[in-house]
Image (cartoon, grey):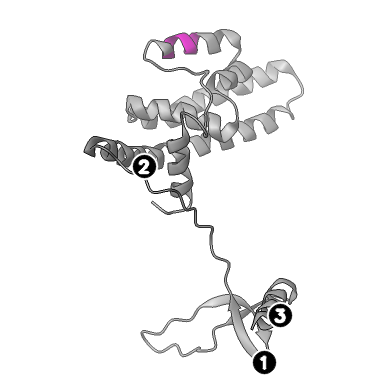
Amino acid sequence: MIRRCAILISMLTFCMQFTCLAQNTNTEQGDQVFITRGFIYHGDTIPWIQLRTVHVFKELKFKKKKDYENYQRLIRDVKKVLPIANEVNAAIIETYEYLQTIPNEKERKRHIKDLEKGIKQQYTPRLKKLTSRQGKLLIRLVDRQSHQTTYELVKAFLGSFRATTYQVFASMFGFSLKKHYDPEGDDALTERVIILVENGQV
């Protein structure tokens, strides 16, 4: 039995993969046909399906109902804010790569100015709908996705003066643009939720 399993695993790893139809190709009403990869083993067609990774965490125990409600609220917030953080990260990468193609500083500044205007028009309506809690979460997730704090990003693209101004303004509302995302510390629960959300487990 062990030998057969070893042979099967070996063939899964090294055999030529190909696209095949499920053997039951009856397309009468109510039946389904699945197209998947597979391989031939002793004359039999065996489907090969790659399953997504399932992350298993230790079960959370909530002492109070409010703690459970806060956790559910965090899930909703992550689902709302994470797509924005991903878009911001994609825009950062695209902008950085494009700036490398602009030959002089004057043209780069002009492009950044136009970009800032476009970002405000695109994101202001969405950001206005975020709560204060979701705004703070967005700042942390931008750092998670881009590996740079919001302060560092503003400083890189708009200069130190603007970065400091935004930091002072944010601090008046209890925000910090300099705070790093800490997946193993303060943001451990948030990291857990993000992984589960990205994998479709919540």
Q: Amino acid at mark 2?
A: Ile
Which image quarter: residue 106? top right
Q: Is residue 153 above or below residue 161?
A: below
Which image quarter: residue 105? top right
Mark 3 and 2 residues: CB-CB less than 8 Å, in contact? no
Q: Earlier in the sequence, mark 3 or mark 1?
A: 3
Does any portion of residue 83 appear in the rendered image?
Answer: no
Total numbered badges shown on the rendered structure:
3
CA distance separating discs 3 and 1: 15 Å
Outermost residue toward the left in this view: 65
187 or 166: which is nearer to us? 187
Q: Residues within 10 Å of mark 2 (few under 14, many from 20)?
A: some
**Residue at point 49%, 35% (across, down):** 85
Q: Position of residue 144 (x, y in %)?
A: 54, 33
Q: Position of residue 108 (x, y in %)?
A: 68, 21
Q: Amino acid at mark 3?
A: Ile
Q: Residues within 10 Å of mark 3 (few under 14, many from 20)?
A: few
Q: Position of residue 44 (x, y in %)?
A: 63, 90
Q: Earlier in the sequence, mark 3 or mark 2?
A: 3
Residue 75, disc: 2
Q: Is residue 80 above or below residue 43?
A: above
CA distance separating discs 3 and 2: 44 Å
CA distance separating discs 2 and 1: 48 Å
Residue marked by disc 3: 7
Does the segment drawn in magenta span residue 62?
Answer: no
Residue 71, disc: none
Determine whether, in the image, residue 53 is placed left or right of residue 40: left
Q: Amino acid at mark 1?
A: Gly
Q: Which residues are magenta?
A: 165-170
Q: Position of residue 1 (x, y in %)?
A: 64, 84
Query: Which mark is in front, 3 or 2?
Result: 3
Name the secondary structure under disc 2: helix
